[in-house]
Amino acid sequence: MPATQRQIDANRRNAAGPHKMSEAGKAAVRLNALTHGLTAQPQLILPGEDSEAYNQLRDTLLADYAPASGQEKMLVLQIAENFWRLLRARNMETGALSTTLIEQRRQLGVRSDPARDPELSGQLALAYTKHDKVFSRLGRYETTIERSYYPRRSRTQ
């Protein structure tokens, strides 16, 4: 179906260059990218996380790699985002272990400092055994993130 003259004229006006949009027009379209979320800005930083630490990590990587093109910048940003996720996974592991150790010690009535406890390795093993699915998922999560850094090697290498 061919375009109408009215559509052709509108296309020409739109292609003529930048035009000013009213505040009402901006308000009407500002959430368009959120209809499905795929083109929205990523929400990488969770509530309670240090957004300034992420920004510093990102800026340091951008300065170190000095990307010369948009594609190179995209890759550096992916490195920063994946490293942030890897740190999160490791913090989750630490938190899960700490919480489990505290709970185990509370149940046993133990009041000594866990850092000086000679039985700490046994308690950690028990924590891993008790919550093996959680730690298994975290391990897979970390492995997936780490694979984003390293290309697959062929079996002939």
Image (spheres, grey):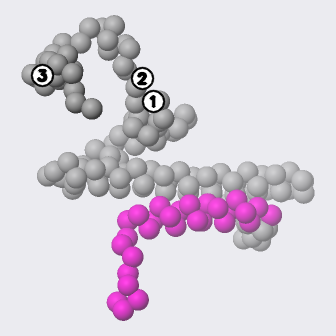
Q: What element carries label 2?
A: loop
Of the image marks 2 and 3, the number of the one nearer the N terminus: 3
The structure residue drawn at horizontal position 47% and vertical position 36%, both measured from the top left corner, is 37
For residue 34, the mark is: 1
Q: Is residue 30 above or below residue 84?
A: above
* Number of residue marks: 3
Whether tag 2 and tag 1 are in contact, CB under 8 A, the answer is yes
Q: Is residue 151 above or below residue 61?
A: below
Instruction: Classify 10 Å Cα crowding around label 2: few (below 14), some (14-19), many (20 and above).
Output: few
Determine the residue positioned at 55% across, 34% down: 47
Residue 24 belongs to the span the image colors magenta: no
> Is any part of residue 14 visible from this angle?
no
Look at the image and tell me in which quarter the C terminus lies: bottom left
Give the magenta part as a residue range: 130-157
The disc labelled 3 sits on which kind of residue? Arg
Residue at x 30% of width, y 8% of height:
23
User: In the picture, residue 113 is in which quadrant?
Assistant: bottom right
Label 1 crowding class (10 Å Cα cut-off): few <14, some 14-19, many 20+?
A: few
Q: Is residue 131 magenta?
A: yes
Q: Distance between the residues labelled 3 and 1?
A: 28 Å
Residue type, label 1: Leu
| Viewer-closest of 12 and 140 | 12
